[in-house]
Amino acid sequence: MIETLKAWDKELFIFLNQLGSENYDAFWIVVTRIESWIFLFILFGILIFKYYPRKKALLVSVFTLLTLAITFGIKFLTKLTVERLRPSHTPELSDAIRVLQFPVDFSFFSGHASVSMAIATFIVICLRKSTRWIYLIYIWPFLFSMSRIYVGVHFPSDIIAGWVIGAVIAYSMYFLMNKMFLEREYFKTIK
């Protein structure tokens, strides 16, 4: 069963990766870089301070950063434990795929997918009652994660696992933030 899933994962990766063309390489290289999304992070901060009073906004900002740090830490430890080779470093795939980047660490699970999903989900949970447009933020983790398949460095299962883990961490951090702070009387009275 596991071998069948691994085979499907490789086949789906090859199919998706081969959809790429040199005409779109520059776009996906920009999409896969974290610095390309700085404007989005600034927007997150603006939205948090727009919809929350200052002290609560600071708390939400701190928990957003904690969500980022915890997700990154879990991703780092998992990669060191699982040690799954990236598609770009898998010898049997070298002739069948397009590779645009060569990271040196391991593949499982995708840090791009987990961190972007964790931050997006945390922001959505925090702001969903304030603006219905906040769900558009999920375009970011989708594009950011898919870029990793396009550039040849992650299998689809790396992406899916990253999304799930990121979402779980985001919900856990939101729950923790509410229980520890926002449900307390002091924060209930802040306007």
Image (tube, helix red, strand yellow):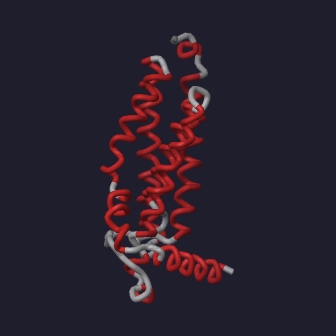
| Above or below: residue 78 compared with residue 177 | below
Residue at 35 percent of width and 70 percent of height: 23
Which picture quadrant has residue 45?
A: top left
Residue at 49 percent of width and 21 percent of height: 52
Q: Quadrant of the N terminus?
A: bottom right
Residue at 42 percent of width and 83 percent of height: 90
Which picture quadrant has residue 66?
A: top left
| Above or below: residue 87 compared with residue 136 | below
- Which of these two is toward me, 149 or 111? 149
The spot of residue 142 in percent (x, y) is 51, 55
The spot of residue 110 in percent (x, y) is 46, 62
Which residue occupies the extreme right position in the image? 1
The image shows a total of numbered marks equal to: 0
The spot of residue 48 in percent (x, y) is 46, 28
Left or right position of 163 against 22: right
- Which of these two is toward me, 91 or 18? 18
Left or right position of 31 against 182: left
The spot of residue 175 in percent (x, y) is 60, 35
Residue at 57 percent of width and 41 percent of height: 135
Which residue occupies the extreme front position in the image? 23
| Above or below: residue 160 compared with residue 97 | above
Which picture quadrant has residue 173?
A: top right
- Which of these two is toward me, 64 or 76? 64
| Above or below: residue 67 compared with residue 150 | above
Left or right position of 175 against 27: right
